[in-house]
Amino acid sequence: MGRNIVIGDVHGCLAELVDLLAKLAPARDDQLIFLGDLVNRGPDSHGVVSLVRSLPNALTLLGNHEARLLQYRKEREPKILKDYDWETVRQLDEQDWKYLQGMKLTHYMPEFQTVCVHGGFLPKEPWDKQGADIVTKIQVIDNDGNPRKRTEAPTGRSWADLWEGPPFVVYGHTPRPDVYRRPWSLGLDTGCVYGGYLSACILPEREIVQVAAHKKYV
Ligand SMILES: [Mn+2]
């Protein structure tokens, strides 16, 4: 049986993804699970999506950046987009868009009682009943128990600090200087696009493999 390799937020960092794949040297029967936010902020969103599309046995979960781009694609309302989305819209080809449309919200591995998701979950609610607006965006819980971005609720607590599994959760979306290990979760976004690291986690051992960013892109 192959390895299960989870990879954090790439954000257009193609060179670092190439480095990480070289270090991991995935075999044909290894399963790769990307945690979403393949695109935006970094230099080559199209390059990243087309590389990931070409990998055998790879799946990608929906990130908030892909969700926003898909909403724009559907509604054609320019106000939906952030400034840096326009460059990504310019880069993506039809096959890239098709790939974005196929992204799932979660990936559950019953053999490890582990679920992968882009953002996270509202603690004390069943994980598999939570919608895209929560699971692709949540970072912290505010004082009223609502899911928020860190910038919206600076005194809020990380959802991961309050999450008690099972299942164990592997997620991205909240960049930190290093991987964030809690008893029931592992945060894998180590801010590659901000000059940090691109991180992977091999399950079930939860072994971490990292490569350094070539530069600070934002
Ligand atoms: Mn994100």
Image: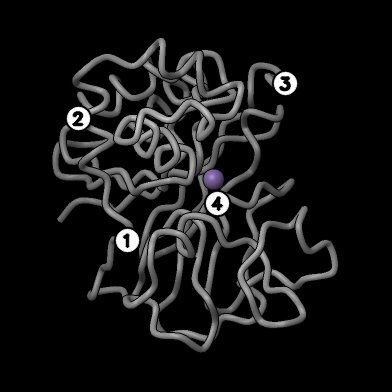
**Label 3 residue near ligand 1, CB within 8 Å:** no
Q: In this view, does 107 lie above or below 75?
A: below
Look at the numbered disc 1 and give the secondary structure of its residue: strand
Q: Which of marks 2 and 1 is in front?
A: 2
Task: Work out whether mark 2 precedes mark 1 in sequence or the reverse, and give the earlier one.
Answer: 2
**Label 2 residue near ligand 1, CB within 8 Å:** no
Q: Is residue 21 above or below residue 116?
A: above
Q: Residue 61 placed where, x, y %?
A: 34, 48
Task: Work out whether mark 2 precedes mark 3 in sequence or the reverse, and give the earlier one.
Answer: 2
- Do the CB atoms of the residues marked 4 and 2 lie less than 8 Å apart? no
Q: Is residue 94 above or below residue 189?
A: above
Q: Which residue is drawn at 24% across and 39% down?
A: 101
Foreground pick, 185 / 23 = 185
From the image, tell me which residue sits under label 4: 188
Q: Residue 175 placed where, x, y %?
A: 66, 47
In the picture, the quarter occupied by the C terminus is top right
From the image, tell me which residue sits under label 1: 106
Look at the numbered disc 4 and give the secondary structure of its residue: loop
Spatial separation of the CA atoms under disc 3 and disc 4: 18 Å
In the picture, the quarter occupied by the N terminus is bottom left
Q: Relative to 107, is 201 on the left or the right?
A: right
Q: Residue at x 36, y 68 (%)?
A: 115
Task: Work out whether mark 3 precedes mark 1 in sequence or the reverse, and give the earlier one.
Answer: 1
Task: Name the residue type under label 2.
Answer: Lys
Spatial separation of the CA atoms under disc 4 and disc 2: 26 Å
Q: Which of marks 3 and 1 is in front?
A: 1
Q: Which residue is drawn at 57% across and 21% down?
A: 42
From the image, tell me which residue sits under label 2: 98
Quarter residue 48 falls in: top left
From the image, tell me which residue sits under label 3: 216
